[in-house]
Amino acid sequence: MNDQSAAMKPRRDVSLDAPSTRQGQMDQDNRLGANQSQWRVGSVNLMNRYAMLWAKRKEGGVWRTASWVLLGAALWGMCMLFMFNSPAAMIGEYWPVLILAFVGALVANATAVGGGFIFMPIFSLYYGIGSLAALKLALATQAFGMTSGALAWSGKQISWRQLKQACFASGFGMFVGTFYWRPLTEVVDLYFGWISLAVGIALLAELCVSRKPNRNREQVEASTSIGYLVVCALGGLITAWVSIGVGEVVALWLLFRCHHGIAQAIATGVATLAFCSVLGFLFHIGLGGITWHYLAFTAPGAVIGSQVGVFVGKRLARPRIGAKQPAGFSLKALVAAVIFIDGVVVLHQASAS
């Protein structure tokens, strides 16, 4: 009887609920389609304007700069369009990250200290990204920013012999630090804190030495030395752990041991850190764990900031007649203080947790 009544009871037509569900899905698809259409139209207009500027690039000056800036903006817009569903919403949420990358790359390319000294603590403490993920993001961002900065420095300002040796040794250190001798995730913050303190003290030592007159110091074009290869390998190892270190190691060696000028030391350090950052970026692409939605904003900010940083570095490296302080003294002192404070804050947070 129960079976017969159940069979006679009319069943609810679930298809009655389908129109509302389908309507909601259609509205969402329409919004996404309209958003993507706007980005496509914007990209086409941007490319048309770029074609007009590219025709005037041979005039040099502002036209050449504008053409490259517009090309980068067009490529970035296309990447945002095809990689993410709602680029406009992402821009509204993550635009402060772009400014952060700009500032970090500016300081990094003006001083040869990696922008990771800004990226890692802010991403870890403010954005809540894990230490290992922050390290991967810092290396990926530096791969764009430091490479752009290395290309902006004049080839005459780079010590190519020392650069080749530094890339060989630091690349080996990066490989070992990434695949074979990796610190535990729990102690990455401790490593970053102590290394930041060491880098800050090294910068202060560099400033103290640079204040002394150097008229009797001759530039030394040293051949391959075991000590230089060892410190570069250690710098690469440290960079694999905390994203900074090798650039300042190379710059300090060229200043103290080879008696190079500050511009040449910084340019060579920037190029070495660019090589290590690109290498680390490629390593971590294979290992996985890069936060691509953050990198979509840190990369363009780092590229633009690196160009400004090289300009600032060149201006500060020029000797000034009658100046009481050496070139770049104020910027180096500020960076040393910031890095030292970074180390203290990160160590405090790590010990508290």
Image: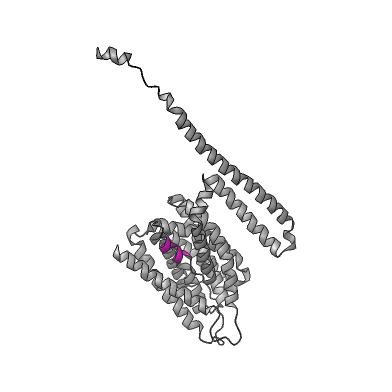
Where is residue 294 shown, x and y percent of the image?
A: 48, 54
Quadrant holding the C terminus: bottom left
- On the question of residue 257 being in view, the answer is no
What color scheme is it?
one colour
Residue 207 placed where, x, y %?
Answer: 48, 80
Q: Position of residue 46 (x, y in %)?
A: 65, 51
Query: Which range is magenta?
Result: 114-122
Magenta stretch holds residue 280: no
Q: Nearer the viewer, residue 325 or 246?
A: 325
Q: Residue furthest left?
A: 1
Vertical comparison of 209 with 47: above or below = below
Is residue 117 found inside the magenta-colored segment of the image?
A: yes
User: Measured along the vertical axis of the image, is residue 39 above or below residue 2?
Assistant: below
Percent from the top left, x then y, of residue 170?
47, 64
Query: For the point 49% across and 71% down, which residue is it?
Result: 250
> Which of the pair 308/20 is nearer the observer?
20
Count of marks overlaid on the render? 0
Tell me: residue 64, above or below residue 43.
Answer: below
Residue at image point 60% right, 45% down: 38
Which quadrant: the N terminus?
Answer: top left
Q: Quadrant of residue 193?
A: bottom left
Residue in front for this viewpoint, 88 or 159 = 88
Q: Residue at x 60, y 75 (%)?
A: 315
For the stretch drawn in magenta, the main secondary structure is: helix
The answer to whether residue 145 shows anywhere in this view is: yes
